[in-house]
Image (spheres, grey):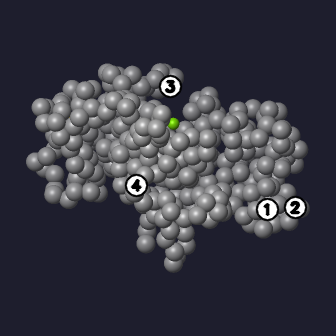
Amino acid sequence: KNTILQVERLQTEFTNDKKKVKVLHGVNFHIKKGEVLGLVGESGCGKSLTSLSIMRLFKGTTARISDGEILFQKNKEEEIDLTNIPEEEMRMLRGKQIAMIFQEPMTSLNPVMKIGEQLTEPICLHLGYGKKKARTHAINMLENVGIPRADEVINEYPHQLSGGMRQRVMIAMAMSCNPQLLIADEPTTALDVTIQAQILDLMRQLQQDQNMSMLLITHDLGVVAEMCDRVVVMYAGKVIEEASVLDLFESPKHPYTKGLIASVPKIGNLKEKLSSIKGRVPTPENMPEGCKFAPRCEEAMPICFQKEPATKAFKGNRHCSCWLYDDEMRDVSV
Ligand code: SF4
Ligand code: MG
């Protein structure tokens, strides 16, 4: 099988004041082996919750997966459903087979632990290395991600490093056990443009060297164009379009995707936020009837406010859910 991860009808909900609030409304997508899949959408569309659901990192929240499957190809023979394996098994998977990088390394690095200790811990746990071998491996990893004087940095604390260097440490840590799948949630958003480009280069290079699969979560379509093979666009807790990067930029189908592409900031103005789509992402408590994008959509038709469009398949392995294409849709509901 050529697929490393298959997310099927994923539903995740929170409980607020004893009321259940669904945030992911049946998310479907897959990641192929060795592929970089972009997951895009404005903030509040459910991108991060999707990645946290895959990792089952819900600690300190009321979130829980209420339906669906997350099938992970653990090895040649074995496919497991991450939604129902025991926590113990999940813990062994995290960091070893599936690693994750977050936007702000300070939230995932321990401020009172030396870089070296933080790096060697998962290496000892997952690879079974002794202290000395783990330390050598950690230094190698730091060198691989372009950290100068790695043998000194290993004895330093996170606050002694710049933001860019901390993110490199996070990448070294994520890659240290050679994961099959790397989930990177806005890995460069907090960094300035030059550093951002360097980190993205590094990630792409490591990804290609190891033929690793990657789920890259970003609101930045520039990053998608640079890095990804295919793209999944999320809106209001659902996937609304899926296509290769080329197809998506050349001929976006969904009005939301068109709006995102139209609002990509021009070069030289990279700090500008996505703003050209009027209105806001609906909150989970106030989901509109019908197409969730209808209140913001300039092409909305009466049916859009009544009935949600199904997700259908198009030529070239594309998917889109929008009533505009009802005629040319093949009847392959997903
Ligand atoms: Fe716009 Fe209707 Fe398509 Fe929704 S289904 S994106 S409202 S045209
Ligand atoms: Mg997010």
Labels 4 and 1: the sequence-earlier one: 4
The kind of residue on which mark 4 rests is Asp
Ligand 2 has an atom within 8 Å of the beta carbon of the residue at disc 1: no
Q: How far across and how far down the image is residue 178, in percent?
A: 66, 61
Q: Quadrant of residue 250?
A: top left
The residue nearer to you, when weighing 128 against 290, is 290
Q: Residue at x 23, y 34 (%)?
A: 289
Please, what secondary structure does the residue beneath circle 3 have?
Answer: loop
Closer to us: mark 3 or mark 2?
2
Percent position of residue 174, x then y: 66, 52
Task: Please report whichever mark, 2 or 1, sits nearer to the chain's N-terminal start.
Answer: 1
Residues marked 2 and 1 touching at CB (< 8 Å) = yes
Which label number is shown at residue 67?
4
The earlier-in-sequence mark between 1 and 3 is 1
Above or below 106: residue 77:
below
* Amino acid type, label 3: Leu
Q: Which of pointers 3 and 2 lies earlier in the amino acid sequence?
A: 2
- In the shown orientation, is residue 259 left or right of residue 79? left
Distance from the alpha carbon under mark 2 to that under mark 1: 7 Å
Residue name at image x 83 percent, y 50 percent: 117
Residue 115 vs 160, above or below: the answer is below
Residue name at image x 51 percent, y 44 percent:
63
Q: Which residue is mark 3?
A: 270
How far apart are the two marked residues, 3 and 4, measured between alpha carbons?
Answer: 39 Å
For label 2, count other residues whose C-alpha is less than 10 Å away and answer few (under 14), some (14-19) or many (20+): some
Residue 231 visible? The answer is no
Res 131 label: 2
